[in-house]
Image (tube, rainbow, N blue to C red):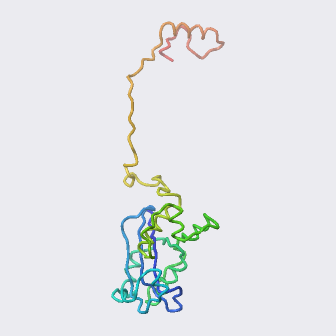
Amino acid sequence: MAREIVLDTETTGFEPSQGHRLVEIGCIELINYLPSGRVFHTYINPERDVPDDAYNVHGLSYEFLKNHPLFRDVGSSFLNFIEDSPLVIHNAKFDMKFLNAELQNHNLAEIPFGRAIDTLMMARKKFPGSPASLDALCKRFGVDNKGREKHGALLDAELLAQVYLELIGGKQPSLSLHMSSKEKDTSLYLENERTFHPPRSYAPTPEERALHQELIAKLNQSLWPTASHSMDEI
């Protein structure tokens, strides 16, 4: 069973080293590349103001966020949800530096960057020179993002999950070749209608027997039965 976590965050700015903080985390669990229905989502009190530039992107004000938990209250739950699964992230460097800054500040285990699958890098490699933003990839793959008036961690993770499946080759990248019989979706296997015919008799006619013996007589050192043997023995 392949488990991956599609992850997105929202923040107060661009650099945790400048005092900026996480304000939202959204995660979606994929099992064998498809959403399982399990999600992790939380808003976070950043313990600071939200600059206008950030607010214009995600629409989360401090007045709204101050009533939500601090990172120290949700950090362990977040780590328990992602476990040790690979993390599918668009522009992974950005999200990972914020996550690890928060984890470090609260004496929680940091996440190795090697666990990140960066869909931005995947898109740039697959479509060099083309726009690789999440909106651009949604447009390329026909993913409906009309509800994305502003950025939102959970909504963006949902969109990214669909984009990721397209980037790796479509909604059924491995079909079911490596799945056990219990895991296979039997709805994928349709029983074809079959036409049955009554058994056919293959006993040779007298005319066919005569022609056969005539042919055998013309062959030198034939391995076929001679006239003294019955064709039923062939």
Q: Quadrant of the N terminus?
A: bottom left
In screen coordinates, is 215 left or right of 185? right
- Indicate the position of residue 80 as horizontal and vertical percent values: 39, 77
Q: Total marks drawn?
A: 0
Q: Residue at 39%, 22% (x, y): give it.
A: 199
Q: Residue at 60%, 10% (x, y): give it.
A: 215
Residue at the right extreme of this rendering? 220
- Indicate the position of residue 223 as horizontal and vertical percent values: 60, 17
Q: Quadrant of residue 201?
A: top left
- Indicate the position of residue 61 as horizontal and vertical percent values: 40, 86
Q: Quadrant of residue 5?
A: bottom left
Foreground: 110 or 188? 188
- Indicate the position of residue 213 as horizontal and vertical percent values: 56, 8
Foreground: 3 or 152? 152
Q: Residue at 47%, 53% (x, y): give it.
A: 175
Foreground: 65 or 194? 65
Q: Relative to residue 192, is residue 6 depicted above or below?
A: below
Foreground: 81 or 192? 192
Q: Residue at 51%, 7% (x, y): give it.
A: 207
Q: Quadrant of residue 62?
A: bottom left
In screen coordinates, is 178 left or right of 70? right
